[in-house]
Every structure is written in structure tokens, then in C-alpha cells.
Amino acid sequence: AKKDEAPAEDVAAEEKPKAKKAPAKKAAKLGPQPKGIDRDQAENARIIIGVGKGAGMSDNAIIIALMTAKQESDLYNINYGDRDSIGLFQQRPKYAWGSKSQIMDRVYSAKAFYGVNPKVKNPGLKQISGWQKMSKNDAAQAVQRSGYPHRYAQWEGLATALLKANKDAPAIS
């Protein structure tokens, strides 16, 4: 299966004509990542971490988001899934998470998961009463409402390691 990246957040909204083409921007240098995490996964994790930081979310909330994206999409921004589920968090347009193009926007979908996206009416993590006292698995399940409610917990260690490896990810508001 092909892994597709949605460029919506990564492309300048407006390009000015230039006489000469500017040299290509080098990809950000990433520090060492947990075993088995490739560059695409690390970049997606950094977006999830950055959105969490920008929203003032706790480390536990960020770990929950990383666990969820790892379980739902293996931390790839995929344009396919079960039924109409797409993106990092496998959100469904049918259930008002947004349009397909919105959900494929990694910042949009991370904000939706955290519950800080004003365009999304579904409850995100912030709207789940008492999520801070739940297990991380149960908090993820409260947002996702998955048919496989116990699969998030297996990724807690990896999510914690991803957050530690990417603490320098800039906040995204």
C-alpha cells in the first residue's frame, strides 16, 4: 500500500514569482528516533507533538495522541482505511471530523484529536470528562470510539520514547 503525505500544511499559501529558482530547502535534521521509526513517522510525530505543545496540552495528552496515531495509521498520513477512515488518526468524514482534505491535513487532524480545532464538533481529548484520570488507552478510546478498544496501550512505551526523542519539536498553533 502506498503511503501518501498531504502537503496542505507544508506548502506556502502563496508563491511570489522569482527570477531564479531558490535552492531546495533541506529537510530538518532529526535526532535519533526510537527503533523502527522512519523519517515520515518521525515527522508526523513531531507535528502531533508540536500541535500538542501549541495547544498547551500535557505530556500525557501528547503521549495519548502519539499512541493513537501509531495504532490507527502506524504514524503515516494515509488516504485509506476502514470504511471512509483516513489520515493519521483515521478520522471519518461521515462522522463530522472534517472533509477528506481537512482530515488529510496533519495539523487539522491533530487539533481535532486534542479537541482544540474549532471547526470540529466531535469531542476531542479536552472534551472528554476526566480523561486525565483514565488510563492512556481508555482516554484514546474515549476519543476514537474504536471497535478494538484495547489496542492503544501497546504503544505507550514507544509514544513516550517518541516524545522524549522529539522534545525539541516546535509548538504549532
Image (cartoon, grey):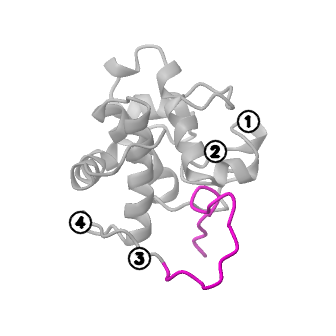
At label 2, the amino acid type is Gln
Instruction: Give the mark toward the camera: 4 or 3.
Output: 3
How dense is the environment of label 2, judged by Cα within 10 Å: few (below 14), some, or many (20 and up)?
A: many
Q: Earlier in the sequence, mark 1 or mark 3?
A: 3
Residue at the disc numbered 1: 95
Residue 71: horizontal and vertical position, in percent? 45, 51
User: Which residue is at 54% across, 29% downward?
Assistant: 116
**What is the C-alpha distance between the residues marked 1 and 3?**
38 Å
At label 3, the amino acid type is Lys
Q: Which mark is residue 26?
A: 3
Residue at the disc numbered 2: 91
SS for callout 3: loop
**What is the C-alpha distance between the residues marked 2 and 1?**
8 Å
Callout 2–callout 1 Cβ contact below 8 Å? yes
Q: Which residues are magenta?
A: 1-24
Q: Quadrant of residue 49?
A: top left
Instruction: Give the mark toward the camera: 1 or 4.
Output: 4
Is 12 inside the magenta-drawn segment?
yes
**What is the C-alpha distance between the residues marked 1 and 4?**
37 Å
Callout 1–callout 4 Cβ contact below 8 Å? no
